[in-house]
C-alpha cells in the first residue's frame, strides 16, 4: 500500500456534483482533497499548481470541457484521470483518450469505490506514466500545442505492460502479461485469457494494443490480440475466411486486412 495520502482534485460545474464526490472521498482515511473547482480553466490552473495524484474531471463544463483540459495541461503532465459524465457516449470518448476510468451520473457508492480503488492502485504501481503515454498517442504529440502552450516531450515508449490489475468480486488480482494467451474485445472492456481462466478488465482493445510489446503480441482481428508464439496452425477457409489455431486448440478469427501481415510474421507467406 502507499505510504502517503492520495492527493485528489475534484472538478465539476455543479455544486451538488462536487459535494457528492467530496463526501465520498472524506470517508477515506488516506485521501486528501487538494481542491474543488467548477470549470475547465480553473481545473487547468489547479492541476498545474496542486499536482494532484488523481483528478475527478467533469466532461461538460463552462470554459473548457474535460478533453480540452487534458489538451491544455498536456498528456505528459496529467494526473490519473477519472471522467465524470451524465452521458454514456461521453464515457466511451473518455476511454478513447485513455482515461483511467469513468463515472456515469448518477453513480452509486460501490461504483465510486471501484474507480477510486483503481486510481489508488495505478498510483501505487507507478503506472501513471503509462496512462500519459496513451493520452499522448491518442491526442497526438502536439496535443498541448493545439491550445497555444508548448508541447510536452513524449514519454519513453520502450517499456511495455508487464502486469495487468484485474478487479473481481471486491478483490484485485495482478495478471502477468507473460501468462496471457490471447485477448478478446468486449465492448469497452477486454477479456484476458490465461490458460483456462478468463479475466475482464476495464480497458479497450485499442488501449491494450498500444501498451503490449508488438514483438510478442499481434492484433489479428478488430476484436482479437494473440500471443504469436502460441499460434500452431494457420487455417484458410474455403469462403475466404481465415483463422489461427493455438497450441491448446483454441481457434481465433483473422481479418482479411491483417492476414498478409500475419502470414509474414508466421513465415508462411506463399
Image (spheres, rainbow, N blue to C red):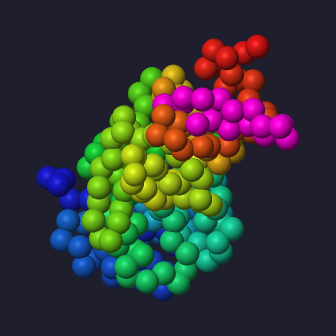
Residue furthest to the left: 3
Q: Position of residue 218 (x, y in %)?
A: 58, 32
In the image, residue 9 lies in the stretch drawn in magenta:
no
Q: Residue at x 53, y 36 (%)?
A: 246
Asked if residue 126 is positioned above or below residue 227 in the image, the reply reads: below
Q: Residue at x 25, y 79 (%)?
A: 27
Q: Residue at x 75, y 32 (%)?
A: 236
Q: Position of residue 78 (x, y in %)?
A: 47, 47
Q: Position of residue 161 (x, y in %)?
A: 41, 36
Please tell me in which quadrant of the rendered image residue 121 appears: bottom left
Q: Nearer the viewer, residue 215 or 161?
A: 215
**Is residue 71 visible to us here?**
no
Q: Is residue 5 left or right of residue 205?
A: left
Q: Nearer the viewer, residue 167 or 24?
A: 167
Q: Is residue 41 left or right of residue 260?
A: left
Q: Which residues are magenta?
A: 230-245
Asked if residue 120 is positioned above or below residue 147 in the image, the reply reads: below
Amino acid at each position: 500500500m502507499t505510504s502517503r495520502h492520495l492527493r485528489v482534485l475534484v472538478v465539476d460545474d455543479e455544486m451538488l456534483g462536487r459535494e457528492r464526490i467530496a463526501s465520498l472521498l472524506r470517508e477515506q482515511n488516506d485521501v486528501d482533497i487538494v481542491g474543488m473547482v467548477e470549470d475547465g480553466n480553473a481545473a487547468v490552473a489547479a492541476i498545474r499548481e496542486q499536482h494532484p495524484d488523481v483528478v475527478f474531471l467533469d466532461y461538460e463544463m463552462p470554459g473548457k470541457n474535460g478533453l480540452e483540459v487534458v489538451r491544455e495541461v498536456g498528456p505528459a503532465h496529467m494526473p490519473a484521470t477519472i471522467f465524470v459524465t451524465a452521458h454514456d457516449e461521453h464515457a466511451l470518448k473518455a476511454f478513447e483518450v485513455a482515461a483511467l476510468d469513468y463515472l456515469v451520473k448518477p453513480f452509486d457508492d460501490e461504483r465510486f469505490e471501484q474507480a477510486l480503488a483503481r486510481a489508488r492502485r495505478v498510483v501505487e504501481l507507478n503506472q501513471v506514466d503509462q496512462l500519459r503515454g496513451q493520452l499522448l498517442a491518442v491526442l497526438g504529440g502536439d496535443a498541448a500545442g493545439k491550445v497555444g502552450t508548448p508541447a510536452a516531450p513524449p514519454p519513453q515508449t520502450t517499456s511495455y505492460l508487464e502486469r495487468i490489475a484485474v478487479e473481481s468480486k471486491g478483490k484485485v488480482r495482478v495478471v502477468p502479461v507473460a501468462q496471457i494467451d490471447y485477448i478478446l474485445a468486449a465492448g469497452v472492456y477486454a477479456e484476458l485469457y490465461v490458460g483456462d481462466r478468463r479475466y475482464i478488465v476495464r480497458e479497450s482493445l485499442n488501449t491494450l494494443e498500444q501498451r503490449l510489446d508488438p514483438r510478442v503480441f499481434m492484433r489479428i482481428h478488430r476484436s482479437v490480440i494473440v500471443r504469436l508464439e502460441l499460434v500452431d496452425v494457420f487455417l484458410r477457409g474455403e469462403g475466404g475466411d481465415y483463422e489461427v489455431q493455438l497450441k491448446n486448440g483454441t481457434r481465433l478469427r483473422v481479418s482479411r486486412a491483417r492476414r498478409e501481415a500475419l502470414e509474414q510474421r508466421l513465415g508462411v507467406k506463399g
